[in-house]
Image: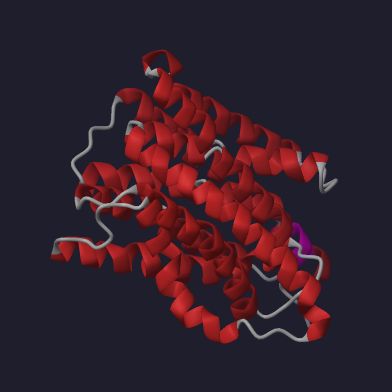
């Protein structure tokens, strides 16, 4: 009897990438409704936390893994605020392109820190992503304040890349809901004090669109894709997960263009094409490997 290799992990990560790509769309709707970056960042996690709080209880044996997951959440809380601040401060395409360089950082972090030697195709795909990002990130057109936002924004892909590498092969497996509870708590422990410290003048949306956007960014663009990624990532490999996630860029830019009426210039369209090509290279490689495995076990 032939045992087919599991493919559903990569498909779950692909679905997660689609939903994650809606983050800039919902964030920009909330910015237009008068909310600031720290409040938008907080809403993204505080609504799911109401649900995940029931799953924080952890057996003592899993305590160290829960702590590692909490630390990932703390780092991610800082990173997501930096990203949303960049979306509020920079041209949307610039912030989005910076964020979606994380597959490149994932390959490098996996190589240097986790000792996972990338394949030749992974390096080629990462190089295409670097070229795509360079087409639309134009430092000469940015002010000094915007350059600071650019530098801070790079925290996001660094942290996301680290998460992709670790969660693709965690030191200890714990239940998905338990891991999600601890990583979400980490976000809240950073974002809630930040929101209180900044003392924003407005903490609630003022329109129906704003309230729907809160639900969208908390559930559609955060909780649902996080569950999909947590379940799918360990069933695939880190390089595939990172490069599959580059689909988020295409979704983010198209959502802005189609739903918010933002213009995409020639370079931004070229960047999207390069991202899809990077994804396609990995898909072809994956299928070729699967075919070889099936033939060898037939």
The residue lying at 54 percent from left, 86 percent from top is 54
Tell me what residue is drawn at x 36 percent, y 55 percent: 40
Can you say whether 231 is above or below 76 in the image?
A: below
Q: Is residue 293 magenta?
A: yes
Count of numbered badges drawn on the protein: 0
From the top left corner, tell me how far across and down residue 23 is, in percent.
38, 54
Chief secondary structure of the magenta span? helix
Way the structure is coloured: secondary structure
User: Between residues 3 and 273, which one lies in front from this camera angle?
Assistant: 273
Between 237 and 161, the residue placed more toward the observer is 161
Q: Residue 3 location, x and y as percent?
A: 76, 77
Magenta segment boundaries in residue numbering? 291-295
Horizontal side of 270 relative to 7 (left or right) equals left
The percent coordinates of residue 73 (x first, y second) are 61, 60
In reply to whether residue 185 is colored magenta, the answer given is no
Question: In the displayed image of the protein, which residue is found farthest to the top?
Answer: 140
Residue 17: image location, x then y, percent: 48, 56
Q: From this view, report whether residue 263 is shown above or below residue 298.
A: above
Q: Quadrant of the C terminus?
A: bottom right
> Is any part of residue 255 visible from this angle?
yes
């Amino acid at each position: 009897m032939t045992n087919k290799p599991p493919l559903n992990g990569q498909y779950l990560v692909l679905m997660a990438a689609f939903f994650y790509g809606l983050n800039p769309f919902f964030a920009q709707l909330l910015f237009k409704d008068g909310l600031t970056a720290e409040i938008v960042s907080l809403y993204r996690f505080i609504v799911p936390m109401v649900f995940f709080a029931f799953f924080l209880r952890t057996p003592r044996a899993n305590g160290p893994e829960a702590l590692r997951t909490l630390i990932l959440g703390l780092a991610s809380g800082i990173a997501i605020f930096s990203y949303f601040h960049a979306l509020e401060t920079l041209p949307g395409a610039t912030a989005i392109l910076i964020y979606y360089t994380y597959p490149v950082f994932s390959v490098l972090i996996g190589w240097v820190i986790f000792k996972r030697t990338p394949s030749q195709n992974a390096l080629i795909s990462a190089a295409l992503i670097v070229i795509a990002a360079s087409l639309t990130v134009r430092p000469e057109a940015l002010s000094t304040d915007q350059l600071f936002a650019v530098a801070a924004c790079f925290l996001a892909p660094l942290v996301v890349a680290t998460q992709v590498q670790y969660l693709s092969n965690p030191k200890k497996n714990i239940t998905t809901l338990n891991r999600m509870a601890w990583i979400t708590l980490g976000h809240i422990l950073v974002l809630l004090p930040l929101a209180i410290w900044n003392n924003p003048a407005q903490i609630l949306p003022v329109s129906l669109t704003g309230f729907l956007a809160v639900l969208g960014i908390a559930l559609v663009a955060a909780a649902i894709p996080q569950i999909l990624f947590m379940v799918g990532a360990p069933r695939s490999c880190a390089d595939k997960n990172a490069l599959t996630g580059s689909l988020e860029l295409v979704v983010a830019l198209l959502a802005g263009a189609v739903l918010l009426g933002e213009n995409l210039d020639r370079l931004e369209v070229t960047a999207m094409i390069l991202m899809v090509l990077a994804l396609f290279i990995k898909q072809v490689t994956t299928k070729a490997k699967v075919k070889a495995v099936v033939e060898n076990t037939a």
